[in-house]
Image: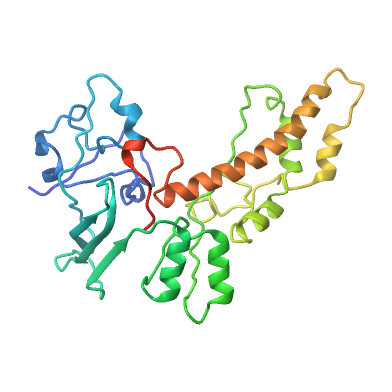
Amino acid sequence: QGQFVLETSEPFYPLLQELTYIRPLTMASPNTFASGLDSHPELENSCNPGASKWKNIEAIEDFNCAGLAASIGTGPFEFVSREANDNGTGDKSVLFARHDDYWGPKPEIELVELKAYEDTDAVEAALLSGELDMALGIGPLSAMQVQDLKFHHSKTVDVRHSDVLQHSLMVMNTNKVPTNDIRVRQAIIHAVNKGRFIQDEFGGLEQPIDQVLPRGAPYCNIDLNPKWAYDLAKAKLLNCPESSNDDISSGAIAGIVVGALVVLGLLIFVLKLIQREKAGKPMFMADATGKGETA
C-alpha cells in the first residue's frame, strides 16, 4: 500500500541523486506502460518506438519498444496540450499548467509553453522581440549568440550562467599505435591549445578542463596533478629523438602531429554534435524522424 522498496547489492551513495535524473527515464507511472503493471519488460519496453537512439535496441530479437501512453510524472507542472508540426514527427509547441496537487512548493507561474524554432537565429530574434521569455541550456543559442546578447543587449535580455553540469571529453584509444604510448598522448595534449580553441569557437564561454567530472559533482572539487595543460615547448621536448631503443619512433612523432590536429578537429565536431543533440537536432537521425527542433 504505497510502499516502494529498492534493494541494492552494495551501498551506493548517489542513489537518490541518480533517481532524480530525467535522462534516461528512471520512473514513470505504471498506468503509462503498455499493459500497466503487467507490462513485459522486453516485449513492452517503455523506450520510444521508431526513435533513432533506440534503433540498435529494437533490433534485438524478442525485444520491442512500446513507449508510454501518456506524460504522467510528479513535477510541479502537468501536461495540457501539444501542437504537432506539419509532418507529425515533433511538436510546434507544448503547453503545461501548474500542478496544484504537486507535493512540493507550488510555482507562481500558471502556464508554461515550450516552443520549437527552426534554428538558433529564430530563437535569438524571438528573445529580442519579446515573443520568447526564456531560452534555456546550450542548444537553443550558439555560444557566440549568448555572448552577444550578454554584452550588447543587456537592456533587453538577462543572461545568467549556471554551474558546470558536464564536461565534453575526447578519449584516446590506448590500445592502438601510436596513442598506446603515454608519451605520445602527453605530447598530443600539450600540443593542443584548448584555451585558444575555446576563445575562437565559443567566445570564451566554455573553459578548459583537466578532469573527467566537473568540480560541482560530489567529491570532485579537488586539485589534480600533474596537469597536462597546453605547453608547446614540452610537446616538442617529448618529440626530441634520443639514442635509446625505447625512443618514440619517427612514425610516432608524425602521429603526434597528425593526432593533435585530429583531436582538435574531433573536439570541434563532438562539441557541435553535443550542441545539436541538446537542441533536438542531432546530426545522425533517420529520415523518418524528421528535422530536429529547438525549444
Task: Say if 202 sits above or below 254 in the image.
Answer: below
Q: Residue at the location (79% across, 46% down)?
A: 231
Viewer-proximal residue among 3 and 245: 245
Q: Decide if residue 278 is on the left or right side of residue 204.
A: left
Spot occupied by residue 278 in the image (x, y as percentages of width and height): 43, 50
Spot occupied by residue 288 in the image (x, y as percentages of width and height): 31, 37
Q: Is residue 10 visible?
A: no
Instruction: Locate residue 205: give its quadrant.
Output: bottom right
Seen as rendered, the residue at the extreme front is 86
Q: How many marks?
A: 0
Q: Residue at the location (24% across, 46% down)?
A: 27
Q: Residue at the location (68% across, 24% down)?
A: 180
Viewer-proximal residue among 91 and 68: 91
Q: Is residue 81 visible?
A: yes
Instruction: Locate residue 188: give its quadrant.
Output: top right
Quarter holding the C terminus?
Answer: bottom left
